[in-house]
Image: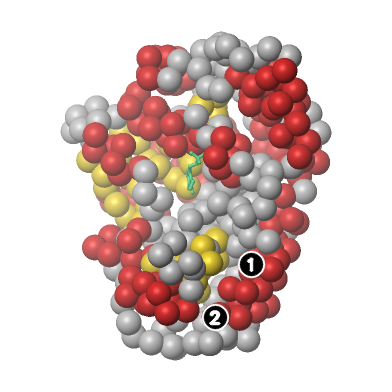
């Protein structure tokens, strides 16, 4: 902000949410839905979510007992960790990792067990996961599509995880905040697709990310009834209920599946606008497979530390990005920056022009 840099650092759109969705919120307020919603969320929204999960992943969740509306994916993740992680429990997570998992694990007395994803393709070494899995493991946190790398777990990855956990009582926290943002015709994946994995998983999702309204902080958690029962014990006394008129609006908006089915195409176009500008620069990349983040590799330009380079880019060139080392074990620095491409065409083109100056 100090340098009035173009902000491709934080993950939020610079274009508005669908006016129809905004109108639905206003309508709900005018219709009087301004008091507490039910603790788990309004039934019609939970029902619409159950239908969406079934349509996309062929998995069934009972809206009554297996879905809870939350204040964004963040609250869903925190609540799930608080409900299940006790002092001394180990929680496996993959680095680079989104920043909210570890503090939530630690504040509950849990011990994060980080496993670094391999190479610039960010592959999970399942053999390494097998080695750190032990009697103290309570939970494994996965995140696909993955922030910050823009990678996605394949069906084979999820199958590997399913096999690895068979016969254990280890839970899976599946952060699917970017579930609808998958590109190049790759199938949308979810832990719910794999029955044994689904039986031990809490899925966390974000309407803010899905519908370009991160400021509304709306999301949900879906999990088998016996897990959801525990989740709700924490949710009830921490939150009680999420924003009511927004729930009404989302329930109505989800009735038209096109509202989420068009998202991969919409964001892929933005990724490609950004990448066509980057192609004319000295930055190197593998196109993002999912999320609205693109990593750029600057090894061929400078050997500066990524944090220093990101600061210089903001200060001297007016473009802000996130250095990836902050998400890695021991701040390992692979000379990569993360750029958010959930931006208007003109923002992406201006950013591209700046990148061509290096
Ligand atoms: N998980 C991931 C991977 C995210 O990138 C984000 C948002 N940056 C969240 C969860 C949080 O989502 P929400 O804003 O709905 O709380």
Q: Is residue 200 above or below residue 212?
A: above
Q: Residue 351 location, x and y as percent?
A: 58, 73
- Position of residue 20 in the picture relative to residue 66 (left or right): right
Residue picked out by circle 1 = 347
Circles 2 and 1: CB atoms closer than 8 Å: no
x, y percentage for residue 327? 35, 58
Q: Secondary structure at mark 2?
A: helix
- Residue 233 vertical position relative to residue 175 in the rendered view, above or below: above
Query: What residue does disc 2 label?
Result: 355
In this orientation, does residue 139 appear? Answer: yes
* Residue 299 shown left or right of residue 287 in the figure: left
Q: Nearer the viewer, residue 267 or 165?
A: 267
Q: Nearer the viewer, mark 2 or mark 1?
A: 1
Tell me how many marks there are.
2
- Tell me the residue at 44%/88% (across/down): 300
Side (left or right) of 206 relative to 349: left
Q: Residue 326, position in %: x, y?
A: 33, 61
- Please state which of residues 204 and 313 is positioned toward the viewer in this rendering: 313
Q: Is residue 277 above or below residue 162?
A: below
3D distance between C-alphas at marks 2 and 1: 12 Å
Few, some or many residues within 10 Å of mark 1 (<14, 14–19, 20+): some
Quadrant hosting residue 250: top right
Q: How is the image coloured?
A: secondary structure
The quadrant the N terminus occupies is bottom left
Please report the residue visible at 48 percent of the width from the left and 67 percent of the height from the top. 4
- Residue at 68% x, 19% y is 29
Residue 47 x/y as whole percent? 68, 20
Q: Residue at x 68, y 12 (%)?
A: 32
Question: Can you see residue 133?
Answer: no
Q: Secondary structure at mark 1?
A: helix
Residue 65 vertical position relative to residue 173 in the rendered view, above or below: above
Q: Is mark 2 within 8 Å of ligand 1?
A: no
């Amino acid at each position: 902000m100090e340098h009035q840099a173009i902000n491709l650092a934080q993950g939020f759109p610079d274009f508005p949410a669908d006016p129809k969705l905004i109108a639905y919120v206003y309508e709900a307020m005018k219709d009087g839905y301004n008091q507490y919603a039910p603790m788990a969320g309004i039934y019609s929204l939970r029902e619409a979510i159950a239908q969406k999960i079934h349509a996309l992943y062929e998995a069934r969740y009972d809206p009554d007992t297996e879905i809870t509306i939350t204040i964004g994916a963040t609250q869903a993740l925190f609540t799930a960790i608080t409900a299940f992680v006790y002092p001394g429990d180990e929680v496996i997570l993959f680095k680079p990792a989104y920043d909210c998992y570890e503090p939530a694990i630690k504040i509950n007395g849990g011990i994060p067990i980080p496993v670094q994803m391999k190479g610039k393709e960010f592959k999970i070494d399942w053999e390494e996961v097998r080695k750190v899995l032990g009697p103290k493991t309570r939970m494994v946190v996965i995140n696909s599509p993955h922030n910050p790398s823009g990678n996605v777990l394949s069906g084979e990855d999820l199958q590997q995880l399913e096999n690895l956990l068979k016969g254990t009582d280890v839970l899976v926290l599946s952060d699917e905040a970017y579930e609808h943002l998958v590109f190049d015709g790759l199938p949308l994946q979810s832990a719910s697709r794999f029955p044994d994995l689904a039986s031990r998983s809490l899925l966390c999702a974000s309407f803010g990310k899905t519908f370009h309204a991160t400021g509304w902080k709306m999301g949900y958690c879906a999990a088998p009834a016996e897990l959801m029962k525990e989740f709700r014990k924490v949710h009830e006394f921490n939150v009680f209920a999420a924003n009511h008129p927004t729930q009404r609006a989302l329930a109505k908006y989800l009735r038209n599946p096109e509202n989420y089915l068009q998202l991969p195409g919409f964001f892929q176009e933005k990724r490609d606008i950004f990448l066509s500008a980057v192609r004319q620069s000295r930055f190197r990349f593998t196109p993002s497979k999912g999320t609205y983040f693109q990593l750029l590799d600057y090894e061929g330009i400078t050997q500066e530390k990524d944090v220093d380079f990101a600061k210089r880019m903001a200060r001297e060139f007016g473009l802000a990005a996130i250095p990836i080392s902050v998400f890695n074990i021991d701040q390992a620095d692979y000379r990569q920056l993360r750029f958010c491409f959930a931006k208007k065409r003109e923002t992406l083109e201006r950013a591209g022009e700046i990148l061509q100056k290096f």
